[in-house]
Image: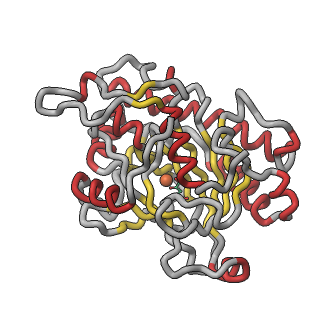
Amino acid sequence: MRLSVPSREGRLSKWGQSRREIPMTLPLVDLSASANAGNAIDAGLSTYGFLQLANIGITSAELDEVFRASEAFFKGPAVIKQQCAYRSAAENFGYQGLLEENLDPGAPADLKETFTMRNIVANPPPRERWPSDAFREIMCRFYAHALACAHDVQRRMAVTLGLPEDHFTRLHSGQNVTLRLLHYPANAALESLVEPDPAQLGAGAHTDYGFMTLLFQHGVGGLQVLDRNNAWIDVPPRDDVVVVNSGDMLERWTNGKYKSTMHRVRAKTGDRDRLSIAIFIDPDTDALIEALPSCVSSEKPARFAPISAGAHLQARLEASHKGRFTQ
Ligand SMILES: O=C(O)CCC(=O)C(=O)O
Ligand SMILES: [Fe+2]
């Protein structure tokens, strides 16, 4: 089954109407300090679809190790990148180079390169698809820990929504949970490789596809979130927080209560490359996403038709590939 992807204009105007103004600083929720973190997460995702979480359980040493491996890979030889090349949306694993993805399918291709890793603990691709054994071990360890931390957040969210604690975790085994390293080269590097279109972005405007995304930035900014006045608000990098945003499926699950907010990454114009790490917490393929009874009432009838998570993810990934990967 293929799902249609709304046009860029349609999506922009839809979010333009439903979102609140985004403050200069996103809400910050400290998981270790607040017994009511679930309520604060609920407030942030209902109001903005974005927030910052502190003390999620991942240490700066762990993050540094992943960022170091990421930097070494992206700086490394093209032959290794090609050995790990991305093959298909169905597999959702491997290296994509500059201009190989359009997160906004209606805009020029993204000025970034990525290494994507779906379901790598339960079902890792063979050894020869990885840059090295050490890289694979670092990524698998980080993936497992990040998923455990995300499950902790999901348990708090379920309780706040009046659901059994495991309501979301049991549908997020890892089958579609995806770790992604992203590299946005600075201008100098870009100019030597491609001729940038002035309208071209690091990552085109988009909403995320799944339940939620955890995003670690690393000193160099560029992430922007669209507010209801159609202004792009910078999300400055902080080493001590993870940015969390709700995706399309969580918006549907909560009947629009939690927003799947449009965001993008500016093209790098400074002299420093940007690195980020995203973990897409996406539901298992057979999960049926339909509005939670507690989010539907006579005043708020169900706004979205039920969908299968797998079909939605596949359709959005394929739209961003524009026929580049056909295997
Ligand atoms: O790299 C970033 O800061 C954001 C990337 C992003 O939004 C995505 O890959 O969905
Ligand atoms: Fe995103």
The residue that appears at 67% across and 48% down in the rendered structure is: 116
230 sits left or right of 84 in the view? left
Asked if residue 293 lies left or right of residue 131, the reply is left
Please indicate whether residue 187 sits to the left or right of residue 50 in the image.
right
Q: Nearer the viewer, residue 258 or 98?
A: 98
Q: Relative to the observer, which residue lies in front, 111 or 310?
A: 310
* Residue at the extreme left of the image, as rendered: 299
Q: Position of residue 114 (x, y in %)?
A: 67, 57
Relative height, residue 5 to residue 33 (above, below) = below
From this view, report whether residue 271 is shown above or below residue 33: below
Residue 144 % position (x, y):
65, 33
Q: Residue at x 86, y 47 (%)?
A: 132
Q: How is the image coloured?
A: secondary structure
Q: Residue furthest top?
A: 164
How many labels, in total? 0
Residue placed at 31% from the left, 38% from the top? Answer: 42
Nearer to us in this view, 107 or 51: 107
Residue 252 drawn at (x, y percent): 34, 36
The quadrant of the image that shows the C terminus is top right
Find residue 72 and report its image quarter.
bottom right
Residue in the image at 34% along x and 20% along y: 163
Q: Position of residue 302 (x, y in %)?
A: 24, 31
